[in-house]
Image (tube, rainbow, N blue to C red):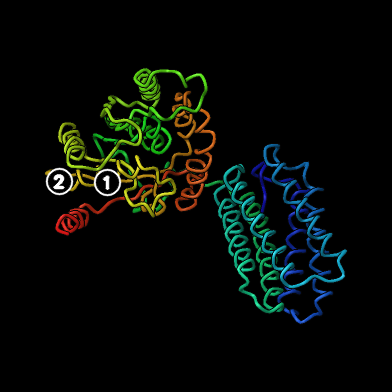
């Protein structure tokens, strides 16, 4: 399943993946079908399988992409340690066995998620990698929580995991053979299902309302650039100046006003790359963006001034965002209330980003390089963005790409404005 280097693996790679898949399937089948062995035999058999798998990963290490070798080494080392422990110990108590197996599965799941974000593979293999990660994490948590109270159920769970891993491994081989045997179909500009796709060509003006100077680039940069390429006018409204976003010692002594000016200048530079025509700073400080009547009125004034036919802002529900920054949530609520009051809302589409439940996607595979280049204009935030955006941008763009058949995709939640108006009205009556 780990085709990281090229679209078509060598014969040696195919042989490795085939043998590894067969080993896992045979081992998993044995454990599922015969979970009544004596404890000692079960432990030794499991240890042998894990040990062989760890050695196989190390043998194949030279074929891995350089930036993923550390991940593969970590997988191999933990498997060698656990496999050796299970083989050398005459017997293990059930509690220790549960802990070892559960931690191994969870650790492998985390590594698979990292590989999912970092590996250069096609969308079909991304799906296999993500499925493997979820299965590993789910079974690992079940084991650690002590769900399998009986050793037979524990063995069955381990066997099921190995069996599924083997099937996924061979499925990856089958995908490569099928893709190499068939001629490549014509590439579509957007391989997504029609009702899931955001079509920027249907709009004339896009208003992006974000909390901080680098949020447009990091969260919506792909959509914005595709919109400007479709001759859509894009206007940016930034609520807070980013004065607390000091991640470099060089800026610690810079006065607040100068630092905000510097950060807005970075936004101007990024805007030139993305084609954003205008930036408006609302004048708030970090952590001082509050959803009150005055701020809602100012946001509504921006909407009325620009008369957009589509608005993009942040998720306003705390439980639906992976990054519940108070300024992000406040901005989302402010825009939510402003849209509900906007008189021309019947001609408006409203999307929120940074959401865990997207229902609209846009393929950004071909424009992601421009998006990242624009994000890199925010040099004051280089330290923070190196930590946050590998998760919030790269991982989720990979994940949403699974749904639309793209290498990278941005996900948005389209808001039903009629329902929004009703909900806001009920909230005000309470």
394, 334: nearer the viewer? 334
Q: In which quarter of the image is the N terminus?
A: bottom right
Q: Mark 2 points at which residue?
A: 341
Q: Locate residue 390 relative to residue 170 in the image: left or right.
A: left
> Which image quadrant for residue 104?
bottom right
Residue at 81% in and 60% down? 83
Total marks drawn? 2
Residue drawn at point x = 33 percent, y = 52 percent: 317
SS of the residue at dot 1?
Answer: helix
- Residue at image point 42% right, 41% down: 189
Residue 212: x and y, percent? 36, 32
Q: Give the image location of residue 423, x and y in percent.
A: 21, 57
Residue 110: assigned label: none
Closer to the observer: label 1 or label 2? 1
Q: Where is residue 304 in the image (x, y as percent from the top left)?
A: 15, 35
Which is more N-terminal, label 2 or label 1?
Answer: 1
**Camera-nearest residue between 187 and 183:** 187
Q: Is 244 located above or below residue 13 in the figure?
A: above
Image coordinates for residue 345, horizontal then vertical, percent? 16, 46
The circle drawn on residue 333 is 1
**Is residue 296 in view from this perspective?**
yes
Identity of the residue furthest to the left in this view:
343
In the depicted view, which residue is nearer to us: 365 or 289? 289
Vertical comparison of 51 with 8: above or below: below
């Amino acid at each position: 399943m780990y085709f990281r280097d090229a679209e078509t693996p060598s014969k040696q790679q195919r042989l490795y993946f085939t043998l590894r898949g067969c080993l896992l399937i045979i081992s998993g089948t044995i454990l599922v079908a015969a979970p009544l062995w004596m404890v000692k035999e079960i432990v030794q058999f499991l240890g042998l399988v894990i040990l062989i798998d760890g050695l196989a990963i190390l043998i194949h290490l030279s074929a891995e992409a350089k930036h993923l070798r550390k991940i593969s080494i970590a997988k191999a080392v933990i498997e060698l340690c656990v496999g050796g422990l299970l083989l050398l110990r005459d017997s293990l108590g059930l509690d220790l066995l549960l802990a070892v197996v559960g931690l191994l599965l969870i650790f492998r799941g985390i590594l698979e998620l990292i590989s999912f974000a970092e590996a250069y593979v096609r969308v079909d293999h991304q799906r296999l990698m993500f499925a493997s990660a979820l299965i590993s994490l789910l079974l690992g948590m079940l084991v650690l929580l002590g769900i399998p109270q009986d050793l037979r159920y524990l063995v069955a769970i381990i066997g099921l995991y190995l069996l599924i891993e083997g099937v996924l491994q061979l499925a990856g081989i089958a995908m490569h053979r099928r893709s190499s045997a068939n001629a490549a179909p014509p590439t579509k500009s957007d391989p997504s299902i029609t009702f899931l796709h955001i079509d920027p060509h249907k709009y004339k003006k896009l208003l992006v309302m974000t909390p901080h100077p680098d949020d447009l680039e990091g969260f919506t940069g792909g959509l914005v650039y595709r919109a400007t390429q479709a001759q859509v006018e894009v206007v940016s409204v930034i609520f807070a100046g980013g004065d607390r976003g000091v991640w470099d010692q060089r800026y610690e002594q810079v006065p607040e006003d100068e630092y905000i000016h510097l950060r807005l200048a970075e936004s101007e530079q990024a805007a030139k790359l993305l084609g954003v025509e205008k930036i408006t700073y609302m004048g708030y400080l970090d952590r001082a963006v509050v959803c009150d009547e005055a701020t809602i009125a100012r946001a509504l004034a921006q909407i009325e001034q620009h008369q957009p036919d589509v608005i993009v802002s942040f998720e306003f529900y705390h439980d639906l965002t992976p990054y519940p920054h108070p300024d992000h949530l406040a901005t989302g609520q402010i825009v939510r209330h402003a849209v509900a009051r906007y008189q021309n809302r019947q001609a408006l589409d409203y999307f929120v980003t940074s959401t865990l439940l997207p229902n609209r996607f846009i393929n950004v595979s071909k424009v992601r390089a421009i998006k990242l280049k624009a994000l890199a204009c925010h040099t004051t935030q280089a330290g923070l963005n190196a930590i946050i955006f590998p998760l919030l941008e790269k991982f989720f763009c990979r994940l949403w790409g699974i749904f639309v058949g793209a290498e990278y995709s941005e996900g948005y939640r389209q808001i039903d404005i009629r329902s929004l108006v009703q909900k806001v009205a009920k909230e005000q009556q309470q």
